Amino acid sequence: MATRCIERLFQKQRLDPADFDDLYAIMKCARGIPDPQGRQPSPLTAAILPANVRGAPHVVLKKMRDLKDVNRIPAGAELEFSPTGMTVVYGDNGPANPDTLAS
């Protein structure tokens, strides 16, 4: 799943709405939700990575917005992440369900 995000960022530097639609479908597929268009996650390979990454821009995930169907996070919520260090998102995930424990 993250592989497609990394691949797109290396290829395009900026993602457009169609990229986000593709990545969202791939994330759902990784959790067992089939995609009508057949989009699938793929493993990270050396062919995806650029040969020389010196001087490449630093990529930081600052926030996720317009969330929906993400466990018990309210629809439309926005999560902001620390630009340095680590941000922990914690909360009750509802009834014990092996399918949601790792999400």
Image (cartoon, helix red, strand yellow):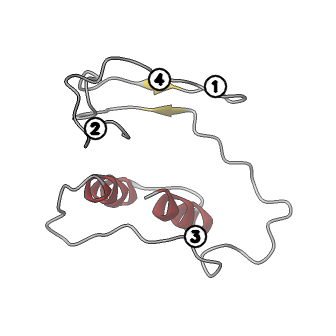
Whether tag 2 and tag 4 are in contact, CB under 8 A, the answer is no
Q: Closer to the observer: label 3 or label 2?
A: 2
- Percent position of residue 64, x then y: 44, 34
Q: What element carries label 2?
A: loop
| Marking on residue 89 | 4
Q: Is mark 3 on a helix, strand or loop?
A: helix
- The kind of residue tagged 1 is Ser
Q: What residue is shown with label 1?
A: 82
- Percent position of residue 83, x then y: 68, 30
Kindly identify the residue that appears in the image at 76 percent across and 78 percent down. Answer: 51
Kindly identify the residue that appears in the image at 74 percent across and 48 percent down. Answer: 58
Q: How crowded is mark 4: few (under 14 residues within 10 Å), some or many (20 or more)?
A: few
- Percent position of residue 75, x then y: 23, 26
Mark sitting earlier along the chain (2/1): 1
Name the foreground residue: 31 vs 49. Answer: 31
- The kind of residue tagged 4 is Val
Residue farthest to the left, as pictured: 36
Q: Quadrant of the C terminus?
A: top left
| Marking on residue 100 | 2
Q: What element carries label 1?
A: loop
